[in-house]
Image: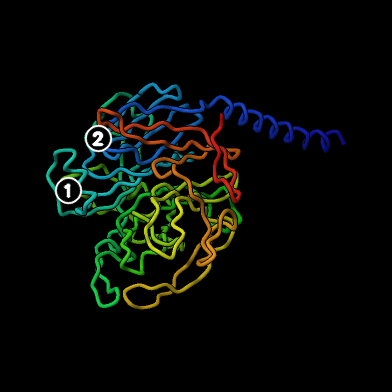
């Protein structure tokens, strides 16, 4: 009888100890962390390695690594493309980010800011950083052994496609402008919370004269075998090593946005995916800044418009919470921050980026600790 009693008590004690350690860790995280001035290109995403005490910021053409006191540890520079949203993968201890090379207004603007030549080449990648190798400022993205990239063929196909919208020919299927949001999360609506997949969100052009850009698009990848694809970055010769297609492709109706999901984040506390956007400008939609995808509802099926025809797709559901638009049924929140950095910490806490331009024209960010509320009045409240 002793063993039968002590055995469960032992595991209860272990669980309570782990919970206590997590509470202490969250309590010790600072209420805010300042990035410092980082040049002319704005912050795109934030990731935190709680176990080792580091925070990572992507500033479009660079990745910076800081400790939780705001001391710069190192940085990765030399990107000629667009480094976007970040997520930290606890399974392998690496930082994953979206990386774009394209010749649209964004790509041209980045290269102009950097004084680099424009290129007609397009390539969309997941950048995989080994944070343990980032040990000093201005480490070169191509020359140092700290970065591998995986090519996403599905994105390139949609980006380069020509489609009919009414009587006009438009570039980019689903108005795909590339990729931005990235997050590790379990299978949506699945029963196993431990197996994580990489979800990659399309950027979506916000044109108000087309009807095929009212959904967010999420690709789902199993990265278990990605070592066979990952290659060093060569910006003069973009490689095409990557999976032929995702294991799933999902659509979420939100109405139009400007450039799609900027930051995508899975929160294990609620079991949901948070999607921060630049609000769209289409009349007839609520044009929220923040959407929450219900991680507990199984994907559904629907028909959407593409290339002047109806196609069958798999869909995800928005969380039944918060303000609801009476005309469209779309739910979301008006929240100013999050599109330049959104990072879950646990127990309903998040770091959220407040980006701004300093008086001398440089971009900077301060991440602040917020608490998720999710009621009809508030999405997040600032922790003080």
In the drawing, does residue 50 fall left or right of residue 57? right
Residue 159 at x, y percent in the picture = 27, 61
- Numbered mark located on residue 40 in the image: 2
Which residue matches tag 1?
237
Residue drawn at the location 21% of the way across and 42% of the way down:
80
The residue located at (75%, 32%) in the rendering is 10
Q: Nearer the viewer, residue 203 or 156?
A: 203
Toward which corner of the image does residue 117 lie, by quadrant? top left
x, y percent for residue 37? 31, 27
Mark 2 residue element? loop
Report the number of numbered marks.
2
Which residue corresponds to the image point at 23% horizontal and 32% vertical from the top-left?
140
108 in relation to 217, above or below: above
The foreground one among 32 and 11 is 32
Q: Secondary structure at mark 1?
A: loop
Q: Determine crowd level at label 1: few under 14, some 14-19, many 20+ residues with C-alpha closer than 10 A.
A: few
Nearest-to-viewer mark from 1 and 2: 2
Which quadrant holds the C terminus?
top right
Examine the rendered structure and indicate whether residue 38 appears above or below residue 211. Answer: above
- Across and down, in percent, residue 282 comes to 38, 62
In the drawing, does residue 379 fall left or right of residue 233? Answer: right
Tell me the distance, in whole angstroms, between the alpha carbons under discs 1 and 2: 26 Å
In the rendered image, residue 25, in percent from the top left (x then y), is placed at 57, 27
Q: Would residue 194 be seen by someone viewing this image from the given angle?
A: yes
């Amino acid at each position: 009888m002793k063993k039968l009693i002590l055995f469960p008590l032992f595991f209860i004690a272990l669980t309570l100890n782990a919970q206590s350690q997590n509470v202490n860790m969250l309590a010790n995280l600072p209420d805010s962390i300042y990035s410092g001035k980082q040049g002319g290109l704005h912050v795109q995403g934030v990731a935190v390695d709680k176990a080792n005490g580091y925070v990572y910021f992507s500033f479009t053409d660079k990745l910076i690594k800081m400790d939780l006191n705001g001391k710069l540890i190192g940085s990765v520079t030399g990107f000629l493309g667009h480094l976007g949203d970040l997520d930290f993968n606890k399974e392998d201890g690496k930082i994953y980010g979206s990386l774009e090379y394209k010749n649209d207004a964004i790509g041209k603007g980045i290269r102009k800011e950097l004084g680099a030549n424009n290129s007609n080449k397009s390539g969309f990648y997941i950048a995989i950083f080994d944070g343990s190798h980032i040990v000093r400022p201005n480490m070169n993205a191509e020359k140092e052994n700290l970065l591998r990239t995986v090519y996403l063929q599905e994105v390139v196909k949609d980006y380069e496609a020509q489609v009919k919208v009414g009587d006009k020919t438009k570039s980019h299927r689903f108005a795909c402008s590339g990729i931005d949001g990235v997050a590790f999360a379990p299978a949506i609506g699945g029963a196993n919370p431990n197996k994580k997949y990489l979800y990659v969100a399309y950027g979506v052009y916000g044109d108000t004269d087309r009807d095929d850009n009212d959904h967010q698009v999420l690709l789902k990848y199993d990265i278990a075998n990605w070592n066979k694809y990952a290659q060093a970055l060569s910006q003069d010769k973009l490689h095409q090593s990557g999976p032929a297609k995702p294991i799933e492709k999902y659509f979420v109706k939100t109405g139009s946005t400007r450039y799609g999901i900027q930051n995508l984040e899975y929160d294990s506390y609620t079991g949901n995916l948070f999607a921060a956007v630049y609000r769209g400008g289409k009349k007839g939609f609520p044009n929220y800044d923040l959407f929450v995808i219900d991680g507990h509802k199984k994907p559904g099926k629907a028909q959407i418009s593409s290339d002047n025809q109806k196609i069958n797709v798999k869909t995800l559901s928005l969380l039944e919470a918060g303000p609801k638009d009476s005309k469209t049924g779309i739910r979301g929140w008006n929240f100013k921050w999050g599109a330049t950095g959104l990072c879950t910490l646990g127990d309903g806490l998040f770091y959220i980026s407040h980006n701004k331009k300093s008086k001398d024209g440089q971009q900077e960010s301060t991440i602040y600790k917020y608490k998720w509320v999710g009621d009809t009045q508030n999405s997040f409240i600032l922790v003080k």
